Structure formats: C-alpha cells, structure tokens
Amino acid sequence: MHYVHGKQVAVIGLGRSGFAAARLLSVHGAQVAVLDDKTPEKLAAWIERAKELSHVKLMLGGIDSITVANADLAVVSPGVPTNHPALETAREKGVTVIGEMELAYGYCPAPVVAITGTNGKTTTTTLTNAMIQASGRKSIACGNIGKAFSEAVFELSSEDWAVLEVSSFQLETIEEFRPQVASVLNVTPDHLDRHQDMQDYVETKGRIFENQKPGDAALLNISDKYTPILSSMVKGRLHTFGFPGDREIQKPGCYVMGDRIELLGRPLIAVSELKIPGPHNMENACAAALMASLIGVPDEAIAKTLREFEGVEHRLEPAGEINGIRFVNDSKGTNVDSVVKALESFEKPIVLILGGRDKAGDFTKLAPLVKEKVTRIVAFGECKHKVVQQLASAATVVEAGTLEETVNGAYAASEKGGVVLFSPGCASFDMFQNYEDRGRQFKAVVKKMAQQKAGKVNV
C-alpha cells in the first residue's frame, strides 16, 4: 500500500480513472494536483464532479513537469503513455510512478479476480461477475469496465470479490498488484503504436502473474500462440482452458470437448446452449467458468449463467433489422484480431464496416475471411485509405465520410438475409469519445434509418 496521508500526489489524466484516483487520495488525506493536457471545456463534466473533493487542485491545459517532479507520488491514468516527458522527469527526481489500478489495489479489502488479453476481456469479466452473483455472493466488475477500481473499493468488503478487466496499459504501472485468480485470454497484435514490439506486449500481459503466490490460480488459453512464453511467467497454480484439439491436456481446466463444455473433468453444458455466437465466445465461457469454479461458485450457478447470458453491449450486439438485413454492433472490435473473430461468427453475405484511428494494425490478415464471406467493405475514419490499400484485392472497398454515410452505404450494398457488421478494427478517438460512444451512435443511425424507410427494427 502507498501511504498517502499528508503527501503531495500528482494525478495525471482527469477522466474516469483520474477522478476516481483523486477521490480515493483525497479521502485518505493526500494533497492532490490533477493534471491533464485537455482544456477545461473538454473536461467540464469531470471538473464539476471534482469540486466536491477536498484538497484537490486542477491544473488543466497542460501537464507541468515541475509539479509532477515535486510530488511524493505520481498516479497515472491508463490512457497516458508511461514515457510521457513529465513522468520521465519525475522518475529522474526519484518520484514513484504508479497507475490508478495499483493505487486502488492497496486500499481494496476484497480478493481480486483479474482478466486480461487482447480480446474477450469485457465478455469474460461480465460473465465471471454474473456467475459469482448467481451464487449469492457480492462482486463488482470494475477496472477497465464499468467503475474504475478506485471507485469500486469504497463498496467492497473482505467477503466480496473485485472482478477486474485489466488492460496492458494498466499492467505497465503495477508494483504489488496481486490477483488471487488471474487469466490471460489470448494475445494477438494490438497497441503496437504504444508497445515496442510483440515481445514487449506479451511480457506486459504476463505481468498479471508477477506477484502471485504458489496458492493463487493462473489461467492460460491452451491453444494460444503465446501460452508457452506466458506459462514461464506463472508463479501460481497453472490451469488452461479452450479448445484442446489434438493436444494432450496436461493441466486441470475447462475445455470445449466436441459438443459440450467440460469443467475440471465434469460435464457442464452443451455448446448449443450458449446464446453468444462464435468459437471465441466458447473460449470466453470456458475461462469464466473456470475462474468462478476456482473461487467456489457451484456448477449449477455457472451453468445457469452461461445459458442465460446474451452478451455485452458493443460486442456482436444485435442492433436491429431492416428489410431482412441484420445490423450488428461490434464497436468494441478495436483491433484486427477482433474483426477476425467477428467474421467467424457470421455467414456470407456480410458487408463489413472498417476504420477509425489506426493502431498499427495489419488489415491484410483479414483477406482470407473477407474473400470467403464479405461482399463489400465500407471504410471510414482516419485510416480508411489504409483499408483500401490493404484489402482492395480481397473485396470491393468503398470510402465514406460521416458515420451516417457509412451506414447508409453499407445498407445499400447489402442483400436480403445478409449482415451489416460494424466491426471497425481500430481505435475510436478520431471521431468519437470512445468505443461506447461509437457503438451508440451506430445504433442510433440504424434506428433512424429504419424509421425513415418505414421498416421494422427490433432493438
């Protein structure tokens, strides 16, 4: 725990995480300076909330290196690169730099389940949390989903569970963070605009196991390419999950065995009972079931949750149907591999909407599936030209401007019985506040279009 009473603490980034960190620090008696590059106009909602906090000063429109370097502790929000010049200067002056998740961990009375991976984090976190609650115990899904961890700690007791969705950015700044159960769902290229290379990205994901003890549980995907590297970083009891295929099962776990899911050697449910589509969601279901079981959730509660769970917003979410054409909101698909998983979940004919802010993604990896299933691609956002360059040989690619033009163009190119798949494969920050904002705007455009065409939309 970082003792902060009476200390000068700099919080870098005023947003969901930054505000929650400032509040936690304020409650525990710190003198807090919150710094952000954004102007007050862009942070109006957070400024209003920050007025309620004691001993918190806002310094907006720039991050002052001197203020950070003179602090006793610096707490950085996940969206701020750890090599920011102000943080580099602070480290040179001997200032400890941690993340908001590390700060919150020190004040969390509850044991922690932590879930990371390139894709599937939100679905698996939501599922695990629902399974715990189905058993009659209290848990809160937080971290990179829902509430910031620093906000959730106020509502937790030693009898509860904190179920954390954890990003690689959050893992960059841990020191003592120790989940009793930790899972890396998968690792595929992502955030290479921030991480040095794949080795750095994989090792950052593996830090989730860094402080575990021999009695803690570590989960890895049995078929993931990087599991051999990650398994060497495990310090707790290793369990695996997913599709064994022809591999010999060497660790206890949860697996898709033909037409059923087996949990620690026991039949759990039939694959056909899952409501969420796609092989990747079978892996997510296995990971969640295994984590829940390892902390004592009965099989009955796990199976009931899997049978009833219909998915999370913005992840292969049905967004409506117009004249026999289905619209699917996969705004949370922010990297190329997530688009692969989305395409694997539907049959031809698909019109695919791609684009946004590039994260050094390689769209050529989509070419085989695009040739097989996609009749047209509508590209939008900052990297639409790159989409055209990399996928024009696999399908017809057209460029669009606004989101409304994009959706209208996709609809016009669709066939009855087909799917318009909004799976951008990119970050959202070129045109939207975040992927949630992007997904909700997409659904709003679909709803408006349905009304204009006097068709029926089921949402």
Image: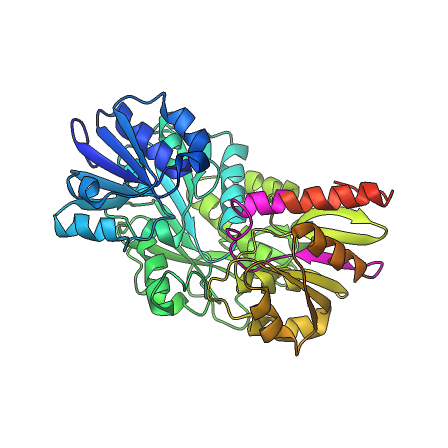
Direction from residue 160 to residue 299 in the image, left or right: right
Q: Does the magenta stretch include residue 258?
A: no
Please name the residue shown 39% across and 39% down the image.
39
What range of the chain is rendered magenta?
A: 415-440
Q: Residue 455: x and y, percent?
A: 86, 44
Please state which of residues 213 and 265 is positioned toward the viewer in this rendering. Answer: 213
Find the residue positioned furthest to the bottom.
Answer: 393
Q: Is residue 170 visible?
A: yes
- Main secondary structure found in the magenta portion: loop
114 relative to 141, above or below: below
Please state which of residues 28 and 234 is positioned toward the viewer in this rendering. Answer: 28
Find the residue positioned furthest to the left.
Answer: 93
Quadrant occupied by the N terminus: top left
Q: Is residue 437 magenta?
A: yes
Please name the residue shown 64% across and 44% down the image.
441
Q: Residue 209: x and y, percent?
A: 31, 54
Q: Quadrant of residue 22?
A: top left
Quadrant occupied by the C terminus: top right
Q: Residue 384: x and y, percent?
A: 59, 64
240 relative to 448, above or below: below
Please state which of residues 419 and 311 is positioned toward the viewer in this rendering. Answer: 419
Q: Is residue 148 visible?
A: no
Counting every numbered tag in the picture gives 0
324 relative to 244, above or below: above
Q: Residue 205: x and y, percent?
A: 36, 58
Q: In which quarter of the image is residue 381?
A: bottom right
Please state which of residues 221 and 165 is positioned toward the viewer in this rendering. Answer: 165
Direction from residue 325 to residue 278 in the image, left or right: left
Please name the residue shown 34% across and 44% down the image.
180
Q: Which color scheme did the rendering employ for the protein?
A: rainbow
